[in-house]
């Protein structure tokens, strides 16, 4: 059975071209390596690019958009299935249920909200799915420095580093997904 990768990423149309190029490369690689895609449903920013690229190269793409954006003209006509979620929480739950892996491309508040939710739900044992940050140009280094403060000051155990993987290339993401083995995460107290 095909596995599905959930990609969290930006809906901004005002980024450096390299971020759209990475989103396009990831979409293509998801498809050509035999994965399907679930994502936020729009046709704007990196969201639109990753989905359109994945669909163009043969992946089954499911977009899940909150009702607030319904009929705003940002639905992606290139994808196989569009789902309208009741709200952002419903959207996150549906994406989490459909995915086998979660990838955070560089993004902002929405991307952080989504990736943190799957980290916490994995930490609490609700799932055992793979979680990957794509750290292009050291984009996430300040966030990882904040994580180090969590460990340093005792707010989180260093064991939490096992919850996610840090990749620097699209190929690393795909290799990680292909070789990932689900395992129980039990937080030592």
Image (cartoon, rainbow, N blue to C red):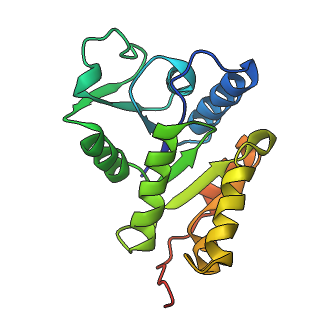
Could you tell me if residue 81 is visible in this image? yes
Could you tell me if residue 7 is visible in this image? no
Q: Residue 99: x percent and y percent?
A: 41, 50
Q: Is residue 127 left or right of residue 141?
A: left
Q: Nearer the viewer, residue 16 or 171?
A: 16
- Residue reaching furthest to the bottom: 189
> What is the tally of numbered marks visible in this picture?
0
Q: Residue 120: x percent and y percent?
A: 43, 65
For residue 54, which quarter of the picture?
Answer: top right
Q: Residue at x 56, y 34 (%)?
A: 31
Placement of 29 over or under 94, stated as above or below: above
Q: Residue 135: x percent and y percent?
A: 72, 46
Q: Nearer the viewer, residue 188 or 7?
A: 188
Placement of 120 over or under 37, stated as above or below: below
Q: Is residue 18 left or right of residue 150?
A: right
Q: Residue at x 31, y 27 (%)?
A: 81
Q: Residue at x 39, y 74 (%)?
A: 124
């Amino acid at each position: 059975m095909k596995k599905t990768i959930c990609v969290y990423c930006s809906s901004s149309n005002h980024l450096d071209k390299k971020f759209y190029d990475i989103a396009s490369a990831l979409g293509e690689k998801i498809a050509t390596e035999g994965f399907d895609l679930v994502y936020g449903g729009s046709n704007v920013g990196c969201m639109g690019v990753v989905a359109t690229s994945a669909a163009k190269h043969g992946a089954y793409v499911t977009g899940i958009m909150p009702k607030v954006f319904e009929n705003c003209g940002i639905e992606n006509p290139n994808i196989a299935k569009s789902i309208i979620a009741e709200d952002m929480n419903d959207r996150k739950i549906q994406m989490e249920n459909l995915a086998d892996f979660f990838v955070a491309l560089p993004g902002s508040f929405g991307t952080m909200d989504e990736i943190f939710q799957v980290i916490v739900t994995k930490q609490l044992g609700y799932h055992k799915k793979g979680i990957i940050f794509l750290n292009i140009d050291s984009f996430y280094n300040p966030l990882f420095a904040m994580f180090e403060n969590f460990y340093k000051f005792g707010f989180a155990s260093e064991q939490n580093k096992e919850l996610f993987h840090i990749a620097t290339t699209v190929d690393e993401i795909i290799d990680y997904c292909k070789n990932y083995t689900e395992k129980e995460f039990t937080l030592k107290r």
